[in-house]
Image (cartoon, rainbow, N blue to C red):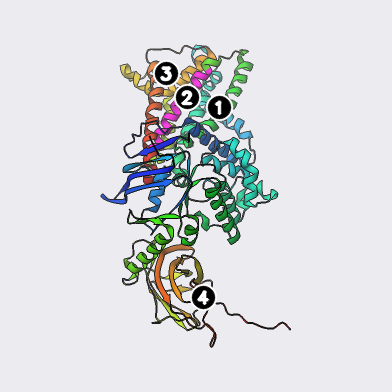
Amino acid sequence: MSLSDNIAIQIKNLGKKYYLKSSESWALKNIDLSIETGTALGIVGHNGAGKSTLLKILSGLTKPSTGSFKYRGSLTSLLEVGTGFHPDLSGIENIYLSAALNGMNRKKIQKKLSQIIEFSGISENYIYQPIKHYSSGMKVRLGFSVAAHLDSDILIVDEILAVGDRSFQEKCFRNMEFQINQNGRTVIFVSHNLFALKQLCPKAILLEQGELTQFGDSKKICETYIRNSTNAVNPIDLSKRKDRKGSGKVRITKVKWKTEILETGKPAILHIAYEGVEDLKDFNIKISINGEDGRFLSPLSMHSNNFRPTVLPASGDIEIRIEKLPWMKGKYYADIRAIERGIVCDDLRVAYKFEVHGGHYIEGGDEFNSKKNGVFIPHEWNFPK
Amino acid sequence: MSKKIHSVSSTDSFLSLRNYDFKKVYSVAYAFARRDLQLRYVQTRLGWFWSIGQPLLAAGLILIVFSWIVKIQAPDGIDYSIYAFASLPSWLLMQQIILQGSPSLVHNQHIISKVAFPRQALPLSKVLVGLLDFGVASVMYYVFRGVKLGVWDFMVFDFLFYSSCTIFAALGVTYWIAAISTRFRDWLAILPLLIQGLFLLSPIAYPSSRFNSSLGENIWVLYLNPMVAISDGFRSLWLKTELWNENIYISFIMVFLLFVSGFIAIRYAENKMVDTL
């Protein structure tokens, strides 16, 4: 039962085996890792690389098939915001329920109740109302407020910073920073938002097909992650990718610029091919264009553009035409999702990586020099009248 | 650094109680029980009246069917209603725990897949809720007996003993069904039938002296039902009837066996639940 003083979690040879239709597959293999007390560790990897399995084992939801781990103090995992909330209960009652589920006792909750309510920003009139009357944003805020006030030594956080509106997200982010730097918590953090992950976690690990392939500086790990995934992706067609989420009714099989060389300010056409089994109603494709550092920059979405064909064939092609390419010189990557009638059919992270060679956004204008990724917006300069 | 070091290993036995923390089990069960109570009479017309109304209706039904229609008589010239209702609160408690506790894991699978709380807390929370109703029904019977017979004595120790037997037996059955149903939900489909069978096989609406059937020497088989000991126990407590016969100890042993085996079953299922549910 020994554990060096400065170590919060020590993992030895951890593995998890699942049986799928009588064949066995390893979701996680040979994980060895030590995490120091008071630090944040990021976990990076594709869907299906074993991130969730690792979190499930560490949080005690499931047993490992091989190996063991030790940890010091109490451990709480937040795999979702607002788990256990009941629509017929009031905000206050839900705070008690959710916090109790996560291992806090009533007295401690009572002490922190006013802080929790204040953090959530939910007004006096609403906090005593059943949460079925809340907006989805309010529910999420309440859920995160409870999570932020749990007082365990180790926190396991899965993708929950992607909730709420922009300002609340920033509040949550600052709260996480505070938890690590001021309260000395140890945090394990999983997110597809590589930008947030890099800011929060100095160190990270990369999981690939259930194995820990790299451990080190989080900036380098994120770069490797993007490079590996896109290098592996771009040459082959997307239908071979296995790391997808969604119902599978439709699969995106191709994303590619028709334009050979992309230049800022010049026209470009993005070609998308998809395959499904039956006609698609109320279909939407959402693409996120992210910078090299993982920061989200621009959305490309059928519905956001008010492009709503009533019926689409089961399989087909679609094109996006951009009159003046807005992105500055640099490397970008795209996440893509297909949604039919509100149900996510396909979800592919880092589906496509591309490079924009600089150029003038405005005819005759200078090129704006920056090492970072950026987006031009049309604007005018005038003298006040 | 005096914080406790926890360790989890693939070789941990599910029987090991090293990471077992009863305080935590209880505090989570309490939170679930509170939730159930708060939600209990949402959108009903009569609200909390049902805490009294439910046992009253159950008692009325038994009286009509078994006394007026089937004409069952209580032994030793005791009034039938006094005799039958003596064990009714314990049966209602048993029924409530089993009916609500058994599907509690399957019904809350979303929470189970996201939060690592002790799973036994879910069935256990139904005990806490059930005890409230049991208390109300017991007080009602106490007053009923007092008014009818003019007897107002109350044996605390015996009452606690038989109540605990009810809880342990009900928890045993509930743990078993809850654990198995995480893999085979068939058990939830036959649950109402199980309850009905248990009611018919238990001496609640009739005295256990009517067990003298065609079973002959094999009559002990009927005493494998823990509800026999509980029902006769409560009658001996309230009405001073004779409890002990040559087979009743089997029933008491079954209470113990059911609880211990059920506890082991749910500990076993707890480890695999997230993968199988």
Quadrant for the C terminus of chain B, please.
Answer: top left
Q: What residue would you read off at disc 3?
A: B210
- The amino acid on which the numbered mark 1 sits, given as a three-letter code, is Phe
Q: CA distance from mark 3 to mark 1?
A: 27 Å
Q: Quadrant of residue A255?
A: bottom left
Q: Name the residue tied to disc 2.
A: B166
* A130 left or right of A325 in image: right
Amino acid, disc 4: Phe
Residue at mark 2: chain: B
Label 4 crowd bin: few (<14), some (14–19), many (20+), radius 10 Å: few
The residue closer to the viewer here, A142 or A306, is A142
Secondary structure beneath dot 1 equals: helix
The amino acid at mark 3 is: Arg
Residue at mark 4: A307
Q: Which residue is mark 1?
A: B134
Q: CA distance from mark 2 to mark 3?
A: 22 Å
Residues under labels 1 and 4: Cα distance? 62 Å
Q: CA distance from mark 4 to mark 2?
A: 64 Å
Please state the horizontal and vertical placement of residue B141, each as a whole percent of the image. Answer: 58, 22
**Mark drawn on residue B67:** none
- Front-lying residue, A92 or B133: A92
